Image: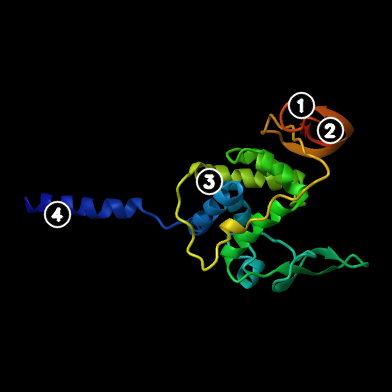
């Protein structure tokens, strides 16, 4: 009787222990920044899955030099409109001799502010405006669009984002409606600048989001007829050209 009792106790204690496992580094990264990604999705419309997949890749799961020393999780360079702290790092800029030289990268007080600035960066630049035509649940379109807009030079960038999203099932985060806001001293929910004005409205043609290699092509200025948002006016039409490999 005692032997049976001890066996039951061992089963109750040991089985949960054996079934549990420590989080992998990529899972730990997602667990740490998921709240931030969801909050930014609600603020700007950028899918949480895309933001986390980019953060994972660009920061090497939080282990890159930029992430450690500059809290820069998205590889965003200074640009002319940056007035904050900076960090010098050799990336892909070269001198006249073709030698890799130091580039100026943005430095943040925390990784959370890197997440906020990443959203503002995409929202405030006209080259990325077409992304916001996509539904936040269509992570494939966002991944392809980011590559097509020139966010990264890696030809496999979109596929790598999609692989991470599907492997970690990050697409489930895009469906979350209620989530607590991150505990930050300052969180600019009400201070997001509007999308920049453009001389032309971007129209994106992307019905099939499983294409392998999209590229942006500019179509000549033409008259667009529509009863809804465009009405009758001249505009540049941006489309995605499908290249089947």
Rendering coords of residue 225 (x, y %):
80, 26
Alpha-carbon distance for marks 2 and 1?
9 Å
Alpha-carbon distance for marks 4 and 2?
81 Å
Q: Judging from the image, what secondary structure is the residue with disc 2 in? A: strand
Quarter residue 14 falls in: bottom left
Q: Nearer the viewer, mark 4 or mark 3?
A: 3
Q: Residue at left 69%, top 73%?
A: 85
Residue bearing mark 1: 226
Q: Can residue 30 be seen in the rendering of this structure?
A: no
Alpha-carbon distance for marks 4 and 3?
42 Å
Rendering coords of residue 111 (x, y %):
58, 65
Q: Nearer the viewer, mark 2 or mark 3?
A: 2
Q: Residue at left 52%, top 68%?
A: 185
Q: Nearer the viewer, mark 1 or mark 3?
A: 1
Residue bearing mark 2: 233
Q: Nearer the viewer, mark 4 or mark 2?
A: 2
Q: Judging from the image, what secondary structure is the residue with disc 1 in? A: loop
Residue bearing mark 3: 170
Looking at the image, residue 174 sits to the left or right of residue 154; the answer is: left
Q: Can residue 120 be seen in the rendering of this structure?
A: yes
- Whether residues under marks 4 and 2 lie with C-beta atoms below 8 angstroms apart, the answer is no
Q: Say if 155 sits above or below 191 in the image.
A: above
Looking at the image, residue 146 sits to the left or right of residue 216; the answer is: left
Alpha-carbon distance for marks 1 and 3?
36 Å
Q: Judging from the image, what secondary structure is the residue with disc 4 in? A: helix
Q: Residue at left 71%, top 33%?
A: 211
For marks 4 and 2 on the same chain, the one whose residue lies earlier in the sequence: 4
Alpha-carbon distance for marks 1 and 4?
76 Å
Quarter residue 230 falls in: top right
For marks 2 and 3 on the same chain, the one whose residue lies earlier in the sequence: 3
Quadrant of the frame with the C terminus: top right
Q: Judging from the image, what secondary structure is the residue with disc 3 in? A: helix
């Amino acid at each position: 009787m005692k032997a049976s009792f001890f066996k039951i106790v061992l089963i109750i204690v040991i089985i949960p222990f054996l079934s549990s496992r420590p989080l992998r580094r990529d899972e730990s990264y997602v667990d740490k920044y998921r709240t931030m990604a969801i909050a930014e999705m609600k603020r700007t419309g950028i899918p949480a899955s895309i933001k986390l997949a980019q953060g994972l890749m660009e920061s090497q799961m939080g282990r890159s030099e930029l992430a450690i020393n500059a809290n820069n999780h998205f590889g965003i360079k200074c640009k002319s409109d940056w007035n904050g702290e900076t960090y010098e790092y050799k990336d892909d800029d070269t001198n006249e001799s073709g030698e890799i030289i130091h580039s100026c990268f943005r430095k943040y007080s925390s990784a959370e502010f890197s997440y906020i600035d990443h959203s503002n960066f995409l929202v405030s630049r006209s080259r990325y405006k077409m992304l916001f035509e996509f539904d936040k649940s269509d992570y494939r379109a966002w991944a392809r669009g980011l590559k097509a807009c020139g966010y990264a030079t890696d030809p496999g960038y979109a596929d790598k984002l999609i692989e991470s999203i599907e492997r970690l099932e990050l697409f489930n985060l895009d469906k979350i409606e209620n989530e607590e806001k991150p505990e930050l001293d300052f969180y600019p929910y009400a201070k997001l600048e509007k999308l920049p004005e453009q001389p032309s409205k971007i129209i994106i043609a992307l019905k099939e989001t499983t294409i392998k290699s999209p590229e942006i092509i500019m179509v000549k200025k033409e008259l667009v007829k529509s009863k809804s948002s465009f009405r009758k006016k001249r505009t540049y039409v941006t489309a995605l050209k499908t290249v089947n490999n």
